[in-house]
Image: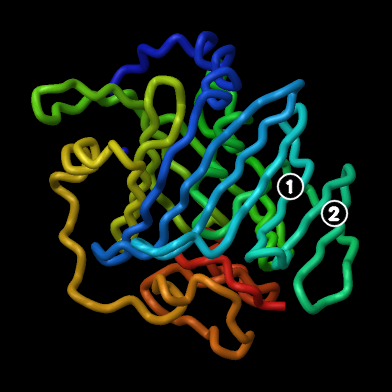
């Protein structure tokens, strides 16, 4: 997620919603070089609303979950994560409060300062972060995001750090590169196309790479000098097989891969290196 700035920022901002209205794609998350989760998404806009819909699952299998996120006038409106006809997590925003529904629990009303939803491994949701990033202003900008699976707000900063171009199979790929820091702990880089649709995410310390289908050449070129993934099998909580609800006590990760936020340990990482897993 790392050249002089030549982008016409105003044009980008003006075209953002139009671009997303025509967009769909597939992200594959790789952990230690192995595919773990597939995120098939589409984004639409209508009357000031930006809506994303995604099918989520293990590589090579039928998607097992669906996620729907809606923002209106650049602010979150709702989020839902469902499996079949069962709602696993649901959030409705109402100003400075949310109504949170978690399967098996009573609905709760909680305060929030979040201006977007960024759930674990739902990479398509970063269109909401870019929707709020002021390209004209540029520089380091700060936001608050909601992690629905933990019912927590956490800080996110994003900075445009360059507009690198790469060569792949004789084709020049023009990108915009951003650096993102989640919860003051997890730093990763994101490459987008010139319309600010994310193509690639990368964090070497977490052995985490996310590639949009069709951007494999970009990933090879941009990460040519990146460390090779270590040869190990990810633990259950980051494996494709764990992309479903799990009992609370199964998760006490203290591993290279990002840890979950807890109220008692603010050093824990908010995003995003394991599938959305319900932990009351």
**Disc 2 crowd, CA 10 A, few/some/many (<14, 14-19, 20+):** many
Residue lying at the far left of the rendered structure: 170
Q: How is the image coloured?
A: rainbow
**Residue 198 in the image: above or below residue 119:** above
Q: Secondary structure at mark 2?
A: strand
Tag 2 residue: 98
Residue at the image point whose x is 31% and y is 62% from the top: 35
Look at the image and tell me in which quarter the N terminus lies: top left
Pick the quarter of the image with the C terminus.
bottom right
Q: Quick check: 53 left or right of 237?
A: right
Task: Please give left or right for residue 195 compared with residue 21 in the image.
Answer: left
Q: Position of residue 198 (x, y in %)?
A: 43, 36
Observer able to see residue 206: no
Camera-side residue: 41 or 2? 41
Separation of marks 2 and 1 at Cα, in angstroms: 10 Å
> Vertical placement of 128 versus 181: above or below?
above
Q: Position of residue 62 (x, y in %)?
A: 45, 62
Residue 266 quadrant: bottom right
Q: Position of residue 44 (x, y in %)?
A: 62, 30
Query: Can you say whether 197 is above or below 187 in the image?
Result: above
Q: Residue at x 76, y 31 (%)?
A: 72
Residue 149, numbered label: none
Identify the residue under disc 1.
Answer: 114
**SS for tag 1?**
loop
**x and y percentages locating residue 224 in the rendered image:** 14, 44
The reply to whether dot 2 and dot 1 touch (C-beta < 8 Å) is yes
Above or below, 58 against 223 in this view is below
Front position in the image: 21 or 261: 21
């Amino acid at each position: 997620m790392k050249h002089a700035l030549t982008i016409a920022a105003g044009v980008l901002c003006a075209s953002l919603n139009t671009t997303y209205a025509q967009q769909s794609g597939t992200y594959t998350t790789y952990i230690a070089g192995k595919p773990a989760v597939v995120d098939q998404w589409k984004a639409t806009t209508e009357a000031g609303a930006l809506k994303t819909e995604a099918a989520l699952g293990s590589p090579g299998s039928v998607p097992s979950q669906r996620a729907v996120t809606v923002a209106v006038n650049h602010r979150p409106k709702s989020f839902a994560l469902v499996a079949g006809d069962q709602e696993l997590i649901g959030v409705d925003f109402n100003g400075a409060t949310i109504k949170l529904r978690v399967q098996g629990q009573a609905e709760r009303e909680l305060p929030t300062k979040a201006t977007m939803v960024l759930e674990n491994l739902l990479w398509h949701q970063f269109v909401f972060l870019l929707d709020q990033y002021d390209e004209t202003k540029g520089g380091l900008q700060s936001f608050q995001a909601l992690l629905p699976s933990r019912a927590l707000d956490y800080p996110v900063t994003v900075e445009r750090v360059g507009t690198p171009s790469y060569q792949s199979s004789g084709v020049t790929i023009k990108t915009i590169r951003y650096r993102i820091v989640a919860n003051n702990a997890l730093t990763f880089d994101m490459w987008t196309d010139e319309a600010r649709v994310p193509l690639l995410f990368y964090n070497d310390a977490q052995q985490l790479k996310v590639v949009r289908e069709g951007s494999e050449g970009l990933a090879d070129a941009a990460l040519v000098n990146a460390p090779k993934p270590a040869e190990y099998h990810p633990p259950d909580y980051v494996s494709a097989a764990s992309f479903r609800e799990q009992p609370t006590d199964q998760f006490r990760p203290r591993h290279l891969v990002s840890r979950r936020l807890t109220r008692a340990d603010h050093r824990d990482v908010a995003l995003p290196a394991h599938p959305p897993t319900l932990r009351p």
